Amino acid sequence: MNKFTKELYSKMQSTIHEISNSGISGFDYYRTCYHETLEISKKLKSYILNYRFSDQREEIIFFKDVKPKFQSKLMYFNELIQVEIQKPLISEKRMLAKYYRRSSAHYAALASRNQIFLHYIRSNYESGDHLLFSRSNENFDFIHTDLDLDEKYSTPASTELSKLISYQMVIEHLAEKVTELISVNEKDTVFKHKLVWEGPKVGLIEFGYAIHALGAVKAPLAQIMEGLQFLFNIDLGQFYRVFQDMRIRQDSRTLYLDEAIRAVNKKMDETDLKVKK
């Protein structure tokens, strides 16, 4: 079991990393990660339903340590989808920061609802693990799970633990979003309108993909695009969709880069002529 679950978890992490580097963001990023994580979670469930634990200790390890790592990721992306759906349409940074703070407080309240269980987990207790994290026939009514209806793949507390982990991840993610918004506001105060991009947006998007493809900047594509947007005071919007349009162009797929090459060559030719004169 250990080998299989480790390899599967590693695959899930790699898949999420690839999606992160693909350039998609926001709702589309969360939704894509959710569906990929769901498929991997299904593989885990299928494996475990056909697996016989060597003893109760191994069963507890799975439902307390292994399964929550997968299930919490699934819940995490599901919650971020909900946060994104309910996000106000207004793009004013101060209002967005306020929304993310309010959402964070909501998840903090959810995480603290079951104080007894929260204390048990945070104190690293193990005395009740045989009741909480094994599919025991003992009559133990501590937590009612509302997602794991399959008794063969659930225990009284495995889903509750996954929820707590996912809530914490959501809170941390929202804190990062708030920090980014505050940082952007501070940068805008100092650097706003220093440089302005006057070419077509698609041209800057081509440059961004070129920088990423060449490995000239060791950063995810989304981060490179964010840097270009900040540097040139421009909103590139859903740049990954523009990239899809670029791929199906009938002529050159890099029109602006081609034009840039011609412009630079022309500039050098003109300079050569001046030198010769």
Image (cartoon, rainbow, N blue to C red):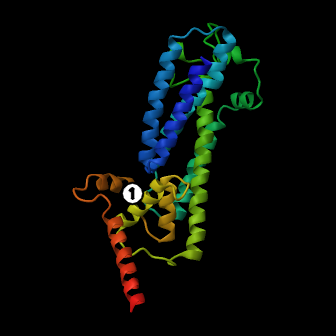
Q: Is residue 272 left or right of residue 71?
A: left
Number of numbered discs: 1
Please name the amino acid that badge 1 sits on: Phe
Q: Secondary structure at mark 1?
A: helix
Q: Residue at x 54, y 38 (%)?
A: 76
- Image coordinates of residue 248 in percent, x first then y, are 26, 52
Which image quadrant is residue 127 in?
top right
Left or right of 84? Residue 128 is right
Residue at the farthest front position: 276
In the displayed structure image, the side of residue 149 where residue 62 appears, left or right:
right
Identify the residue at the far left of this view.
250
Q: Position of residue 236 (x, y in %)?
A: 41, 63
Can residue 95 be seen here? The reply is yes
Give whichever of 180, 127 is nearer the camera: 180
Camera-nearest residue between 134 and 275: 275
The extreme bottom residue here reads 277
Residue at 56% across, 58% down: 98
- What residue does disc 1 label? 239
Looking at the image, which residue is at 60% across and 64% down?
183
Q: Is any atom of residue 82 visible in this view?
A: no
**In which quadrant will I find the C terminus?**
bottom left
Residue 257, image x, y percentages: 36, 65
Q: Quadrant of the N terminus?
A: top right
Q: Is residue 239 above or below residue 156?
A: below
Residue 254 x, y percent position in the rendering: 32, 61
Q: Quadrant of residue 107 in the image?
A: top right
Crowd tier of the residue under label 1, counting other residues whose Cα lies within 10 Å: few below 14, some 14–19, many 20 or above: many
Q: Is residue 99 above or below residue 234?
A: above
